[in-house]
Image: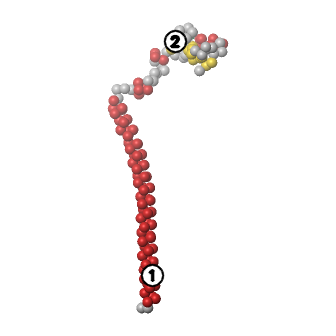
Amino acid sequence: MTPITITLLLAAAALAGATAAWLLVRSKLMRKKTSNIVDLAAARRRKMREASLNPIRTDVPKRKAGSVSGAEIRGFTPKNGDARLQSCTRCQKKSDTVGFYVDEYGKLVGVCNECRKSAKNRDLMPL
Ligand SMILES: [Zn+2]
């Protein structure tokens, strides 16, 4: 072996070593970056999973309580109930179809079907 080939071999070995080291560092960096992304995605997924699980957990006791109906929770009054009957501002008759208007003084008036015509004649603003 000539000294030239030895130096060439050494240079090639050094180059190969350097390349290998560079690739190793690069792959490590890449892995670090991708692992960060994976961690974030996993955290997001975990968050989503928790968020999707939590409402169900909080809903279960509400449903188990059971004695309170949905209508009571929402404060909903059924259409045919007596609670819906409102008295007419003009004739004081109870009516389930009360139309609301604003009079000349900006006051709210609820009028029944019979008094609605007079409200329209007075040119009140309907609500
Ligand atoms: Zn009326």
Query: Would you say residue 117 is visible in this rendering?
Result: no
In space, the residues marked 2 and 1 are separated at their CA atoms by: 103 Å
Q: Which mark is residue 99?
A: none
Residue beneath disc 2: 87
Name the residue rendered at 55%, 11% in the picture: 89
Residue 91, horizontal then vertical, whole percent: 56, 8
Residue 120, horizontal then vertical, whole percent: 64, 15
Residue type, mark 1 in image = Ala
User: Does residue 99 lie above or below 71 as drawn?
Assistant: above
The N terminus lies in which quarter of the figure? Answer: bottom left
Residue beneath disc 1: 11
Residue 74, horizontal then vertical, whole percent: 43, 26
Residue type, mark 2 in image = Ser
Q: Is the residue marked by circle 1 packed among few (<14), some (14-19), or many (20+) residues within 10 Å?
A: few
The answer to whether the residue bearing label 1 lies less than 8 angstroms from the nearest atom of ligand 1 is no
Name the residue rendered at 46%, 16% in the picture: 83
Residue 67, horizontal then vertical, whole percent: 34, 26
User: Does residue 63 lie above or below 10 as drawn?
Assistant: above
Location of residue 26 by image quarter: bottom left
Per the image, label 1 sits on a secondary structure element best described as: helix
